[in-house]
Image: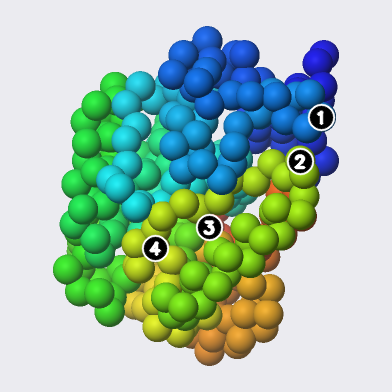
Amino acid sequence: MSDSKKPTKNNLHPRNLHQEQYDFQALIETLPELKSFVRLNDYGNESIDFFDPEAVKFLNKALLKHFYKIDFWELPMNYLCPPIPGRADYIHYVADLVKGKKNVKCLDIGVGANCVYPIIGISSYDWSFVGSDIDPIAIENALQIASNNRILKDKLELRLQLNTSSIFKGILSENERFDLSICNPPFHSSALEAQTGSQRKISNLKNQKNAKVVLNFGGQNNELWCDGGEERFVKSMIIESKLFSNSCLWFTSLISKKDNLPKLYKTLKSVGVFEVKTIQMSQGNKISHLLAWTFQNEKQQKDWKLTQI
């Protein structure tokens, strides 16, 4: 095994397909256009310039084609280009919540133009998805991705959220049920904070010669920040989830800032959830948490998993 394929110490989920460092020769065979971005790094290993948005985009295109059978994947200019391994981890961890359930249906809140969570969930588990977003450009681009990839056909529906103050209202229809809802909420509380955070990340990376991290190049305001940041967004989601307690088995959200968890636990207690799970996820030096909650008791959870949606 070459150095470029040695397992990384990133503690990814056991089913995550990205346990090893990128095999650039295999990826180039899958997507020849990637070749022009690959070079030897300071350690003599093949890599790309992770500060080059085009290089990162073509790496993602290669990963999505190689591992998830995605032939068409484009993004509008200045939209988020997400790191694939971390996104895959989220999907595999929420899959554990519905283990044994057939015909899983998942709601992706803030699906984005990149459509990455549905791609991984459909390819890995044959789930069906509804993706919602407040951005019509993101929805239109996600529709293009869905319509130009056979594997996504009849598995992904996109819905535009017209009320920016709502999360589930206006998206979930009466008597509609989902096994899971997922969300990667806006982390920052302002555009300035988002910009400062990106600059700090870049500065830290430049001090790590072999840092294998993909930056979120670009990103629209609603992708990166919202009033009150992650804490307020997820708190609003929890409060609104109470109104749809019988519409979803497991509500979940990614939590990037650990300090937000105690405040969110208080909100969860106030709305009367039956069970809360917190799952730590890590990739390299980055640690995040998956917060999951359900209003269904043990018997209801068991019965739910036996039903076919």
Q: Where's residue 169, x and y in %?
A: 25, 72
Answer few, some or many: residues within 10 Å of disc 2's Cα (few below 14, many 20 plus, some between 14 and 19). Answer: few
- Mark 3 vs 4, N-terminal side: 4
Q: CA distance from mark 1 to mark 2?
A: 8 Å
Looking at the image, do the residues carrying marks 2 and 4 touch, with CB atoms under 8 Å apart?
no
Residue 301 is labelled as 3
Judged from the image, the secondary structure of the residue bearing numbered disc 1 is: loop
Query: Between disc 1 and disc 3, whose residue precedes?
Result: 1
Q: In this figure, which residue is indicated by the disc labeled 1?
A: 43
| Left or right relative to 297: residue 141 | left
Residue at 62% from the left image edge and 20% from the top image edge:
24
Residue at image position (64%, 24%) is 39
Residue corresponding to mark 2: 210
* Residue at the spot 28% in from the left edge and 59% down from the top edge: 133
Q: Earlier in the sequence, mark 1 or mark 4?
A: 1
Q: Name which quarter of the figure residue 298 lies in.
A: bottom right
Q: Earlier in the sequence, mark 1 or mark 2?
A: 1
Q: Is residue 305 visible?
A: no
Percent coordinates x, y for residue 136 in the rendering: 19, 57
Which of the pair 119/176 is nearer the observer?
119
Label 3 close to label 4 by CB (< 8 Å): no
